[in-house]
Amino acid sequence: MALYAGICLTVLGLTATIAAQADMNNSCKWKCLTFAQLWPGSFCMDLQDDLLHYWPSLVKSSAFTFWTKEWSKHGTCATCADSMSCPHKYFSLALQLRSKLSIDAAFNAAGIKPSCNNSYTYEDLHSALSDLGTHVGLQCYYQEGRQILMQIKIPLSKDLSIGCNTPNEHFSRSFYEPCKNNAAIYFYPFTQHPHNPCP
């Protein structure tokens, strides 16, 4: 069973918003991208079904409103790259990367399955993703004493090859924290009630 995942192509080394792209010359100084999978109108034509399935809005806003915000916040920073120069290319690329960098397949091959009761070690999860590079970032949310896997970030170079290790750049801020490698990590299932998957 395939997992539902939202995806986000995030540009590193830039502030989250670029003042309505006031200075496009400076927006292309980035060196790395982060492909993030999160456990989420003409430019969506031909893409809408896949976006609804693989990049749904997990909050109450409409899918179109959610995708508009993703484009405004993340996509506009990458328009200087031909592969992401318009909304259609940006969303198409994100869907292609989801398929190419399949976290679902890597976890399935390692026997890692979503569960409310079984946990995994940091090493279990990280080693299952070893084919995706050494700098894969696991991010967690903490609730009632549990460390819950929320997001996986894969750094990519500008040419979209795996790995981009530039120590001077930093990941964009997130609501989640890096997972601690000394505590159990829960990988919750996606259910009809995403706000309470494990009642």
Image (cartoon, grey):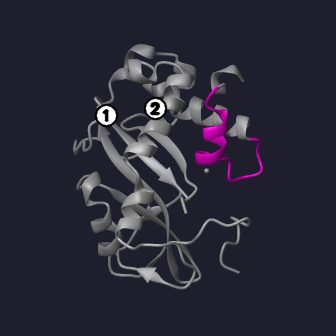
Q: Position of residue 83 (x, y in %)?
A: 40, 22
**Vertical order, 149 against 146 (above or below):** above
At x 27%, y 43%, the residue is 162
Q: Quadrant of residue 87?
A: top right
* CB under 8 Å between discs 1 and 2: yes
Q: Secondary structure at mark 2?
A: helix
| Residue 118 image point, x, y percent | 49, 84
Q: Nearer the viewer, residue 20 or 39?
A: 39
Q: Is residue 173 visible?
A: no
Give the residues in magenta.
46-62
**Which one is nearer the viewer's eye here, 163 or 51?**
51
Badge 1 density bin: few <14, some 14–19, many ≥20, Cα 10 Å: some
Q: Residue at x 61, y 39 (%)?
A: 50
Check if residue 103 falls in the magenta segment.
no
The image shows residue 161 at horizontal and vertical percentages of 26, 37
Q: Amino acid at mark 2?
A: Leu
Tag count: 2
User: Which residue is disc 1 drawn over?
Assistant: 160
From the viewer's side, name the closer residue of 179 and 82.
82
Quadrant in which the C terminus is drawn:
bottom right
Quadrant assignment, res 20: top right
User: Could you tell me how far apart the alpha carbons at marks 1 and 2 are, in whole angstroms?
Assistant: 10 Å
Question: Is any part of residue 175 visible from this angle?
Answer: yes
Q: Is residue 184 above or below residue 123?
A: below
Q: Is residue 155 above or below residue 76?
A: below
Q: Who comes first in sequence, dot 1 or dot 2?
A: 2
State which quarter of the image contains the N terminus. bottom right
Res. 118 mark:
none
Report the residue at 50% width, 72% height from top.
187
| 47 relative position to 118: left or right | right
Q: Which residue is mark 2?
A: 93
